[in-house]
Image (cartoon, grey):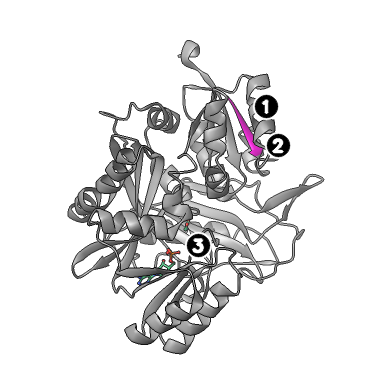
Amino acid sequence: MQSDSLTVLLIGSGGREHALAYALTKSPLLKKLYAAPGNPGIGKLAELVPLKVTDHAAVIAFCKANGVGFVVVGPEAPLVAGLVDDLAAAGVASFGPSRFAAQLEGSKGFTKDICAAHDIPTAAYQRFTAEAPALAFIEKMGAPIVVKADGLAAGKGVTVAMTLAEAEQAVREIFSGRFGAGECVIEEFLEGEEASFFVLSDGKDVLPLTTAQDHKRVGDGDTGPNTGGMGAYSPAPCMTEALCAEALEKIVKPTVKAMATMGHPYKGVLYAGLILTKQGPKLIEYNARFGDPETQVLMLRLQSDLLELLMATANGTLKGKTAQWRKDPALTVVLAAKGYPGEVEKGNPINGLDQTFEKGVEVFHAGTALDGEFIVSNGGRVLNVTALGASVKDAQAKAYRAVDQIGWQGGFCRRDIGWRASGK
Ligand code: AMP
Ligand code: GLY
């Protein structure tokens, strides 16, 4: 394989990227892995480079100077900023959608219009660019109703309003400019269990990966404010094979076809957030990148060569490829700094990360930093304690045993990750 081996640059610094690095470094195709900016966990698997990711010229120059043949973009911001387009223009191959295609995540209005044009099941909706008609629409529809800011809002731009007053406040906030966009989508409230479905698309062909469920609320019992995700498990027991097939045929494939027809083929991972309603799966949103913390559980279950799959996605050769997964479920618990998702203190020491955990446990770093030789907290979501088990319950017990072996005064976690699935 030496002649095919590749130097890869991974962009990002979260738990998702640590999990991607964990899988990429298992690939026989990999010669060397760089990560920018990375974190101390990723630093054990890759050479970290202090590149400013928003400076595309600097990223390109680094790739050229260091023989990087493939760039894997983890987070959404560089995708929406067109990093993949700029790399392509400079002759550097990369994994991730173009700026235009990343609108499937970056603009809820864009995605909703594609759904409407191609009969893709989703909540009924209307787009607004001014406050008064949005408020009038809410009056007419009544509560519960869902108000979404258009554009990236780090998961914080959505209000599921159970009362009219909540909905009105959300609309006023959006048009006060808090999220920049000054545009909103108002949609029908859907009822059902939520699940995430991941596929790779090379622009023409789609390879289904697997499913997961996450816990968005900060508190036990799914209470408190929304976060980027406090834990996840894979597979999602509610996503039967029949439901995966239905989501693939009715939601994902028509979207991929629509993007190709528009002249902007979607190349990358497409992460569909679904609600399983009485009428079948409906799309809540797309993400144009891997989930965080869903990737942490996906990578523990993946048996196939991740680098090979990502390269096939980028160069249009996914047809006929398969992805193999461990049958055993995986579960991850997010350790966050006290105060998250609000203001947090940084720089608190974390102990116990160097010990050998039980077999099947991996601790992925997210917001950590090195202070001398010590690991300290450096963000909201800090560690992802992830375990494979014979059942969700087993993976859950293993993950929490490992959580209890980590010493961090300034941190907390939910104690009920996987509750919905742990009887299965
Ligand atoms: P989003 O950022 O679009 O994923 O929305 C965040 C969360 O809001 C979702 O995970 C759902 O729990 C909820 N949500 C979004 N849209 C709807 C909807 N139409 N009906 C009910 N809940 C929704
Ligand atoms: N965990 C939700 C996300 O990655 O968007």
The residue indicated by pointer 3 is 229
Q: Which of marks 2 and 3 precedes in the sequence?
A: 2
Amino acid type, label 2: Leu
Rendered view: 112 above or below 201: below
Name which residue lies at 64% across and 21% down: 64
User: How many other residues sit within 10 Å of disc 3, few (<14), some (14-19) or many (≥20)?
Assistant: many
The answer to whether one can see residue 151 in this image is yes
Query: Residue 62, labelled with which disc?
Result: 1
Amino acid type, label 3: Gly
Q: Is mark 2 within 8 Å of ligand 2?
A: no
Amino acid type, label 1: Phe
Q: Which of marks 2 and 1 precedes in the sequence?
A: 2
Q: Which of marks 3 and 1 precedes in the sequence?
A: 1
Rendered view: 27 above or below 149: above
Q: Quadrant of the N terminus?
A: top left
The residue indicated by pointer 2 is 51
Q: Quadrant of the C terminus?
A: bottom left
Q: Secondary structure under badge 3? A: loop
Rendered view: 223 above or below 34: below
Q: Is residue 302 left or right of residue 345?
A: left
